Image (spheres, coloured by chain):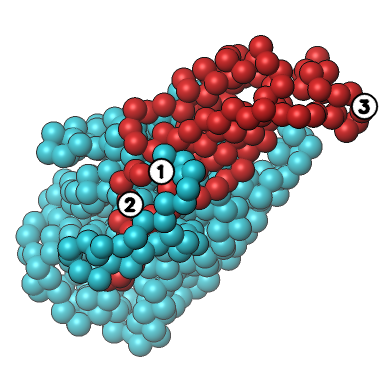
Amino acid sequence: MKNLRMPLFLLALLGSLAFAEDLEFSAADTAWMLVATGLVLLMTPALAFFYGGLVRSKNALNTMMMSFSALGFVAVAWALLGYSLALSGEGNFIGDLRYLFLNNVGLENKGAIADISIPHMLWMIFQGTFAIITAALISGAVVERMRFPAFLLFITLWSLFVYAPLAKWVWGGGFLADLGAWDFAGGTVVHINSGMAALAAALVLGARKDFGRQAILPHNVPFVLLGAALLWFGWFGFNAGSAWAASATAGLALTNTILAPAATVVAWSLIDLRRTGRVTAVGLATAIVVGLVVITPAAAFVSPLFALAMGAIGAFPSYYVLLWRARSSLDDSLDVFAVHGVGGITGAILTGVFAQESVNGLFNGLIAGNPAQVLIQAFAALIAVVFSLTVTFVLLKLVGAITPLKATLKEEGVGMDITQHGEEAYTSGEGAILVRSETPMPVARPKPAGGTD
Amino acid sequence: MKLIVAIIRSEKLNDVLEALFKAEVRGLSISRIQGHGGEMEQVETYRGTTVKMELSEKVRLEIGVSDHFVEPTVQAIMEGARTGEVGDGKIFVLPVEKVYRIRTGEQDTAAVTPVS
């Protein structure tokens, strides 16, 4: 995804003189976008593994369910209303209702707010996968304590009232696009947005009862690595798919999506090595995500060499914010703010530094003699920060007025899997007695002599 | 000397360890066990199959102490493990015939005195 000027650039690249409103339908572009949509959708279950591995075993299912439920609730909200609010109409702030309930969303490559060579419907659902992952990302800040029903209500409303407007401003021809801020695949809409919403959510919810009192360790680090691997894989659809075409632009975006996280992994490992003498697995998995976040707004705007530079530089702010956060009283449990918020801001600003017109055909950054672009990028990031923080804060207060946000201390102690879902991630089945009907069976309780109560 | 065996809620382990540490009780073993103590069964559902979990996860502590440490140890466990609801657990105090410290061959009270 990018701003609306992008299709003009694609045309220029193809040497076509056609009008911007009249892209030819392309089977090749459609084929790639079918795949890319599946790839972006995979990022949400990937995130479930990434987050699920980082929490304690008694909360593993609950954490994974927060991502998985976004696949349902946010997708439905997107189809019924969110898409229309985000990507329709001439307004600068919010869309209209022309695509309500998917009215007027057809299989032609016409009728969408942007100029596309693929079916409008495919474009709608490709965009929907972004809304899903963005809402799921916030869950990292509230794991191990937020009541599940409250979470469901929160992400559904959030996708409509925070995600959709911001998507409109950046991608739907809104005022941030008019300002000249560039965001190729969603650094602002997805990452700054979810990172700030996470910060607001952590502040409203408050800390877990054990936070700062005892060590809370990841229960399955291989899950974290698996999640990072699948996120990286899915991100090819996220970034290269944001070209909306099987094009040279997509090739550049995919190259940068490999190189930038690679550089972040190297930089992160070296910082780790210098600071503690050891390279950590959780650190490396985090570095991959930070690199992906940083390159997202710039994926097809910078040369591969500058993508390496962005990845390496991007490691530093997130690494040190993460260190600070762990010692602070802020229980953003899985560091969504440090990774997506700080990484997103770094990426947005570095896009204004390293962009070159000779690469992207659109605009220059600082390095190519246009320092003003850095300020424009920073200003757009600042607006996203303020908007996401305040509206998420208010939204959570509203949800909290309807239903309690936080589980009780006892529920938190027993674990969210059992108290919220009535299931366990790792159960031996010992002592489990089958219940055949609603009325409890007269079962003999195992009560050995000298039992514990 | 006595052997104190305590069965507590898993989620209270940290509070108990904290209380024991404050009471200067050092040297203990824990094991994860399953047990049943008359508390309400937990009901879980897996794809339409509803089960009652009759056994719940508990932690067993074993602490060998000299006689004058029995009371502080028991108090610390009581304080750390109590929630006031059924299922908080039990503390057993058992007589001990002989204790050896393997490293030095020290016996009895000398063997359960923490190395400072």
Residue type pointed to by label 2: Gln
The spot of residue A5 in percent (x, y) is 32, 59
Q: In the shown orientation, is residue B65 left or right of residue A417?
A: right
| Chain label for disc 2 | B
Q: Amino acid at mark 3?
A: Thr
**On-image quarter of the N terminus of chain A:** bottom left
Earlier in the chain: of badge 2 and badge 3, it is 2
Residue at coordinates 48% horizontally, 23% vertically from top-left? Answer: B78
- Of the residues under marks 3 and 1, which one precedes in the sequence? 1
Q: Which chain is red?
A: B
Give me the residue at 39% from left, 74% from top.
A38
Look at mark 3 in the image and give the residue it sits on. Answer: B104
From the viewer's perspective, is A313 left or right of A104? right
- Give the vertical position of B4 relative to A355 (above or below): above
Taking the spot 57% from the left edge, 15% from the top edge, the residue there is B71
The answer to whether residue A327 is visible is no
Give the CA separation, mark 2 to mark 3. Answer: 47 Å
The answer to whether dots 3 and 1 both sit on one chain is yes
- Where residue B42 is drawn, which disc sits there? 2
Q: Chain of mark 1?
A: B
Is residue B99 found left or right of B4 in the rendered image? right
